[in-house]
Amino acid sequence: MSLIIFRKDEIVSLCKGKKVLHLGFIQHTIYEKKIQENDWLHSKLDEVSDKLVGVDYLKDAVVNIREKYKYECYFGDVMQLDQCELNDTFDIIVCGELIEHIENPGLMLDGIKRFMNENTTLIITTPNPWYVERIKLIKRNKLEDQWLNKEHVSWFSYETLKQLLARKGYNAQGGYYYEESTERMKKSNSLVDKVKYFFKKIVMSYTPERLYDGLFFLVQLKK
């Protein structure tokens, strides 16, 4: 992994020329807005991967994406992957910003194994509860009920995610991502945004990675 990771950039880089399964690929119901803004991770993966398959539980959206945008995708609940009609193994499985939405992540981690072989890499990303900006909010007495994503049901720290993965039979190389993408950090080529980007890079260089925005794990089956 890169020294400083930008989540989407790193995922796209790892998926170049690979056979990829993208779990929870739709990104809620805002995917069409994301497509129009060229900010949909799935379409970015489609540009670089050798083969791309999506799985999501939003059935109507899956049908729409398959028919309108011609992506190969399947309806499936990540906690019941044994019932998904997809039967294949992949080089890379992307599980990005998903595990914190799941009521029983252990079921998902067990179910993913049917799509893996001994060389498959599973990418798991999730928000870091110790992100410096979240800590600042709490210090200002702005508690979770004021800013937490209403679809999130859990937090994972570096160590708790590492321990869960080990318990489920995985080897994990863990790290942190700083921001979603360099594109989002730069915003635009205006002089104001260039100056802001310059100062953000200075802040980034002095911020301990344990205080970055999220966790970024590369995971394989134990051999």
Image (cartoon, helix red, strand yellow):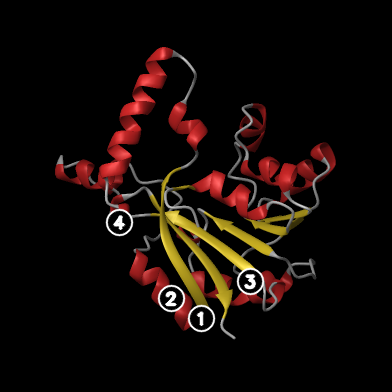
SS of the residue under disc 3: helix
Query: What residue type is disc 4 on?
Result: Arg
SS of the residue under disc 4: helix
In front of the other: 38 or 73: 38
In front of the other: 195 or 210: 195
Earlier sequence position, callout 2 versus callout 3 = 3
Q: Which mark is residue 164?
A: 2
Query: What residue type is disc 2 on?
Result: Leu
Residue at which label 3 appears: 112
Where's residue 112, x and y in %? 63, 71
Earlier sequence position, callout 3 versus callout 1 = 3
SS of the residue under disc 1: loop
Disc 2 packing (10 Å; few <14; some 14–19; many ≥20) = some
Count of numbered marks: 4
In front of the other: 194 or 143: 194
Disc 1 packing (10 Å; few <14; some 14–19; many ≥20) = some
Earlier sequence position, callout 4 versus callout 3 = 3
1 and 2 marks in contact (CB < 8 Å) = yes
Q: Is residue 158 placed above or below 43 in the rendered structure?
A: below
Which residue corresponds to the image point at 50% horizontal and 69% vertical from the top-left?
105
